[in-house]
């Protein structure tokens, strides 16, 4: 199974300290306003420095139940940096890419996207049971899930390469890792990627990748800091967030291979919507596209250091396998 949440626990734990240090500079944090009801919505909501205004036509297209309540009930599994995080550990206030994007979509639709924490493996069943309308939780769009929910896809992500600031070894692609020592977390898709690429290294005569495995992403980062390896391979969103936040952005940078802008073996991630609410799926897709078109979505992704995984078109159920 190739999806962004496969090894989420260790990744989230490794990034937790970095995330907490960086949140003070992020701004735009929100609350888990699960109890928020209807009522008059503000004319605009500020997200990532942008005043996102309501589109009356899109609001009219919403299901009657959503218009009446003024709320879209959103399930999310926290923490999973940079998509969903607590502003302060032990408290309920949320921040993150998914949270900000949800607030922007809600503002465009003229309703509140009310986020409530939910264990990841229980999210889809909870939507089926009618407890939630949608999920925004770094969820990979795949055919199995499409059978029970619809997706509005907002990003495409896979594995990325992180190097020390300045990229002294001039790493630009996976091929540049041949013959060099590389850090990776054990038992991950990223380890499988490096093992598979050994054949390409052998064929090119560049020497085998010196794969160094570590129990946690944070351990691999320590090896990279200490120059014991030339690069670390991890999920591209995690790489982008770490590069943006570690030492105030002065420790690492992400290699952006033009041939794999969203990362290697990338797959679509989407907003999961109840199949009982097709009008909501339509409205979310149109609202997201409007945020892409006016540049708001780009600013939200940039806030978390993951511009490269953003899509240019809000597609629906993009996964084909």
Image (cartoon, rainbow, N blue to C red):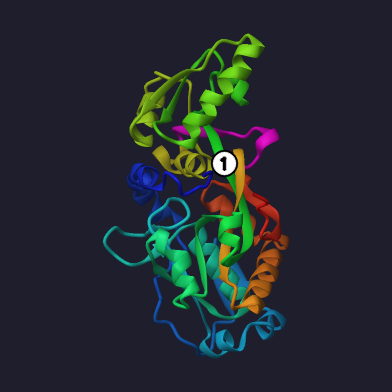
Percent coordinates x, y for residue 235 in the rendering: 50, 40
**153 falls in the magenta region:** no
Percent coordinates x, y for residue 168 in the rendering: 53, 20
**Which residue is drawn at the image coordinates 33% and 67% (left, top)?**
92
Residue 141: in sight, yes or no?
A: no
Left-right relation of 108 to 98: right
**Which residue is drawn at the image coordinates 63% and 9% (left, top)?**
205
State which quadrant residue 200 falls in: top right
**257 falls in the magenta region:** yes
Percent coordinates x, y for residue 194 in the rendering: 52, 26
Left-right relation of 304 to 225: right
**Which residue is drawn at the image coordinates 43% and 68% (left, top)?**
30
Percent coordinates x, y for residue 106 in the rendering: 57, 74
Q: Is residue 24 positioned above or below 71 on the image? A: above
Q: Is residue 261 positioned above or below 182 on the image? A: below
Secondary element at tag 1: strand
Left-right relation of 259 to 199: right
State which quadrant residue 197 falls in: top right
Q: Residues within 10 Å of mark 1 (few under 14, many from 20)?
A: many
State how many labels appear.
Answer: 1
Left-right relation of 178 to 29: right
Residue 82: in sight, yes or no?
A: yes
**Which residue is drawn at the image coordinates 50% and 90% (left, top)?**
39
Q: Which residue is mark 1?
A: 158
State which quadrant residue 265 falls in: top right
Q: Residue furthest left?
A: 90
**Where does the magenta region start and end?**
250-262
């Amino acid at each position: 199974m190739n999806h962004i949440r496969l090894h989420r626990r260790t990744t989230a734990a490794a990034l937790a300290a970095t995330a907490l240090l960086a949140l003070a500079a992020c701004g735009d944090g929100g609350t888990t306003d699960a109890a928020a009801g209807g009522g008059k919505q503000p004319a605009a909501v500020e997200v990532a420095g942008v005043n996102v205004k309501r589109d009356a036509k899109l609001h009219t297209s919403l299901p009657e139940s959503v218009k009446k309540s003024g709320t879209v009930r959103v399930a999310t599994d926290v923490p999973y940096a940079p998509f969903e995080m607590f502003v302060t550990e032990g408290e309920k206030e949320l921040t993150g890419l998914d949270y900000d994007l949800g607030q922007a979509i809600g503002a465009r639709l003229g309703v509140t996207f009310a986020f409530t924490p939910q264990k990841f493996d229980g999210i889809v069943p909870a939507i089926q049971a009618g407890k939630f309308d949608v999920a925004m939780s770094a969820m990979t769009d795949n055919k199995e899930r499409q059978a029970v929910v619809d997706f509005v896809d907002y990003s495409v992500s896979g594995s990325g390469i992180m190097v020390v600031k300045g990229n002294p070894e001039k790493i630009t692609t996976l091929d540049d890792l041949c013959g060099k020592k590389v850090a990776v977390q054990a038992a991950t898709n990223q380890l499988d990627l490096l093992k598979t690429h050994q054949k390409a290294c052998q064929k090119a005569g560049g020497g085998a990748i010196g794969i160094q495995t570590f129990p946690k992403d944070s351990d691999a980062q320590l090896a990279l800091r200490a120059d014991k390896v030339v690069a670390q391979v991890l999920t591209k969103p995690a790489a982008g967030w770490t590069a943006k936040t570690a030492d105030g952005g002065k420790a690492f940078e992400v290699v952006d291979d033009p041939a794999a802008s969203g990362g290697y073996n990338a797959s679509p991630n989407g907003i999961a919507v109840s199949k009982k609410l097709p009008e909501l799926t339509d409205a979310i897709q149109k609202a997201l596209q409007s945020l892409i078109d006016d540049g708001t979505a780009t600013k939200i992704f940039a806030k978390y250091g993951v511009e490269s995984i953003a899509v240019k078109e809000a597609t629906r159920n993009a996964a084909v396998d």
